[in-house]
Amino acid sequence: MASIALQATRRSTRVSSQRLGLGALKAALWVALAVVMLFPTYWGLITSFKPPHELNTDPPIFWPQQWSIVENYSFVLTQIPIARYYLNSFYVAAVSTLAVLFTSSLAGYIFEEIDLKGKEYLFMGIIATMMVPFPVRMIPLYIIFRDLHLVNTLAGLYLGALTSAYGIFLMRQFMKTVPRELLDAARIDGAGEFSIFARIAMPLCTAPLAALGIFHFMYEWDQFVWPLLMIDDGDLRTLPLGLVAFRTGFGVQDWHKIMAGAMMGMIPVIIVYLLGQRHFVRGITLTGLKS
Amino acid sequence: MTASKAAHAPPLQGSRSRLSQLVGSGPTRSQTIFGWIWLTPILLYFAYFSYYPIFSALSMSFHRWSLTIPERPFIGLGNYVWVFNDPTFWISLTNTLYFAAVYVAACLVLGLVLGTLIFSFREPFKSIMQTVVFLPVMTSMVVAAQVWDLMYMPGYGILNYLLGFVGLGPYMWLQSPQTVMPAIIILSVWKGLGYFVVLFIAGLTTIPYHLYEAASIDGASPFQAFWRISLPLLTPTTLFCLVTGSIGAFQVFTQVYATTRGGPGKASHVLLLYLYDHGFRFFEMGRASAIAFILFGLVLIVTLIQLRLLRSQFQY
Amino acid sequence: MTQQTRRLTRRESLRLAAGLAAGALLAASCQPAPTPTPPPAPTKAPAPAVPPPTQAPAPAAPTATAAPKPAAPAPTTAPAKPAPAPTTAPAPAAKAPAAAGKVRLKWWSHPYKAWNDELTRQKITYEGMNPSIEITYTVVAYDELYTKFTTAMLAGTGPELMGAQSTMTPNLMAGNWLAEAPKEVADDIKTKFFPVCVEGVNFNGKIYGYNQHIGGILPIINTEAFEAAKVEAPKSWADMLKLTQTFDKQSGGKYTQAVGNFPYTSWVPFVTWGTILKSMGGDILSDDAKSIALNNDIGRAATEEYLKYVHPEMGAENDTFGQGKSFVYFRGPWIKAFLDTQFPKLKYKAIPVLQGSKARIQKDYVWNWVISKAATDAQKEAGWTFLGWLNNVANQVSMVKASALIPTTKASLEHPDVANDPWVKTFVGELAYKTEYAGRISNWVQVEKVVNDELALLATKVQSVNDTLKKIETEGNKLLKESKVFV
């Protein structure tokens, strides 16, 4: 996997003890980085295991003296129909992600590989939509969905997110690295444009597709304000809306319960990430370009 | 088009243009048909779900559009003039620019360095480190910001407690106008870094392996390989990270909203918070829209500069 | 490699199918709006007298409640509708099918568990007694409640019943969004409710809702700390200052009372400072609510006094008080549940209003139930009846027991269960101090933000007392120029 040059360096580290010390220092730095990156998440997790009276103590409690995992998590599981919320969230995020992967890679391919008149302007027009903050579009967009009779439906949550300017931009940038010689060779063989896209361009873009899939799924999974506007019925709530029930209001927070909910909310995202991560490990090296 | 494309992939330039000549320089008819057939629904989608609301908002910005007033009189550029005369706008603008500059620079540099290093790792360390760095991205921003708020708490927060062992602090973090922006930037970099790392790793996977082999045979050091091969070939990725990172950074909101609400005073007030306050706390939607389009203009200019700079920078 | 390609192709074909379906659907739904120019709502410049155009179609709007084809209509049917944007003033709203049997009401409020549980229980009881009424109670995140309100009301899909704080009520009233109470209801409210509470819904002599509970802010003291120091609970601000010095000495010059942590609780500096100001005879707004004059002797003295209690370096007041680091802090009755669970060892109590030269306090808010103007006549009628029932003595008293929120009718305030509970009783006693409401002016939220922002800069030693007061004056007066005042 690693580049040969870097492997060579690593091999030579074994030679001198001075380099060994350097290696230890490097390892220590990586461990330090890992600790810094993990600590806040650890703190969130450990908070979700604590009883209320161990929450905001001075000095802080790093390892609960009294565990309250069962109480906190069973509270979350019993107080709200969490399975229902999971399902709603997953349905919305999955439909939207699949649609976005398809539309983004296709549009990215067309924008990058096919010379259409005025496409740069169209492309810039799509990118520009990212620059208008969502809060001002919210009300007009809500009115559109009202007229489509989609307020208070799950379709209203994903129908506005079937394509993504961000995704199109991302896929176009990565299509730039697809060697055109491969595409042209297929064109000479008489392959249709769609099959060139699907059979040649797409397999070369598994890593960016995985990245986009993860990002978009996370983005949709984490959506709060739009579902808040759209959904009134308890049955149609997504997970972030459902978890609001643990905010007690009046500036007082039940941190242990909020964190228990938040940790449960993270699980699907982690799963999607782990599924997608395989595609980062595999790269273009497998699909080969040795000719 | 071919020229600009080739500019991003110098080592392949020769073979690419030669084959393109064989096929013909322009797009074939079937290509054009394919392109428009698939692009049209996507463009219509954007027209309906993005441009239509955007133009509605644009129209709002020319009206006195307040929830508390039943009428909606046309006032031309009145909202824009009002915003430009409001000192809070200028404070928010300064804070936003400060945030965007530091956040994007930190994430790009750290992301590129960490991404390259992690990419060169052997398994399982590669996957482990990538996951570790990406874990903060997977947490919800509201929750992450609240955890950091607890950690930052002066008096009994963990951060001051731990820094105390090293002889630093105590700092007021989010409670002091001097430290609030750095504190928010630290939390944002922690949260967002993994995103950049993953994108750079994804970019590195698309670089043909044989280029590194060739460099290694020529006796190039890892640093040279990074500088001569990875960096130029990562230009599309870097450009993407820069542009989307900046667009995101200019719209920084959730972490500020969930921790300080712009305080203490207006020390961490940012543009989107300013917009949100006017739109949904003061119910002055016309002003909120005006703020949005000022922000839009700003981001558009920054993006165009970035696109131009990075294109010319790596023109071969 | 070949295997991999084939697998991906299969996956692609699935995506292709999904995409084709989506594409067709989109192409269909895009039909009505090829020209993005006409905005939906705002451009009603020529006819200013008409209420917001988007509001009008409300009852006719095809929400789940009124539409003949409710819920999940297939999106493909959408294009059959004419142009989506109601650019032109829509036809006068057809009366919803009131005769169709059940009256359905949407009711929105914010989350506070004890309170929500009790309201839901009362709602179910009411529905049991009145089978012809169906109420959907929806809890919306507190911070985003008004975001949802605003959007839904503008689109005409808003709830018929909603909760609105006293700072929000004047906004809604000024924007012509609220239904006025019919005469008999208004008279009922005026006679039965405690006068201070009625002010929260009384604008220019008209009543716009029922108030359900009132927020009182009182000093809460750590009784153990007081016993240990062998001192009495303070009765006046002068006592308080002496106590501050006593506790300062005992803790080695450390902590007295924490008013820090501006983020979540931005109303706290305002409430504490405002209360001190009022106790000295000052006020934030002038009597006619048209100007702010603070840079005077009283304003300066009150602000200096306030500074003695502010310790942002301590962290959040809830926690420092719970950890026993501060001997007093200011909060409302609802805080009891929090303190009891998070700090089970803490002994505390609320004490009566501190006396100054003038015994007045800054009131935080009143919670009102209001009815949307867009509701049908049948819905309005059912709504007023329900709200009246919801605020009868029995329900208000059981709400006090469930949530420690202070009730609003005279009869429930005198009810033995309320009058004898020491915690609640102290907060009820506070109602005797006549207070002015924040909700007198239409943009109070903005004024309050100015006050809080400048006080935060003062507390973090960025600016002096004089500069703080001057800035509040300038900024505040600018805002008051464009505000509406209600009496």
Image: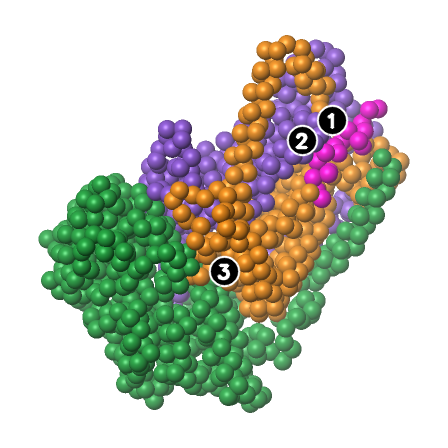
Chain colours: A orange, B purple, C green
Secondary structure at badge 3 equals: helix
Q: Quadrant of residue C8?
A: top right
Disc 1 packing (10 Å; few <14; some 14–19; many ≥20): some
Secondary structure at badge 2 equals: helix
The residue that mark 3 highlights is: A246
Residue B268 percent coordinates (x, y): 38, 43
Task: Identify the magenta region.
Answer: A275-291
Secondary structure at badge 1 equals: loop
Task: Confirm whether circles 3 and 2 share one chain.
Answer: no
For the point 67% across and 25% down, which residue is it?
B120
For the point 46% across and 48% down, which residue is it?
B146
Q: Is residue B35 left or right of residue C83?
A: right
- For the residues labelled 3 and 2, the Cα–Cα distance comes to 37 Å
The residue that mark 1 highlights is: A1
For the point 24% across and 44% down, which residue is it?
C251
**Chain for numbered disc 2:** B
For the point 34% across and 42% down, which residue is it?
B155
Query: Are dots 1 and 3 in contact, CB under 8 Å?
Result: no
What label does residue B126 carry, if any? Answer: 2
Q: Is residue C462 left or right of residue B81?
A: left
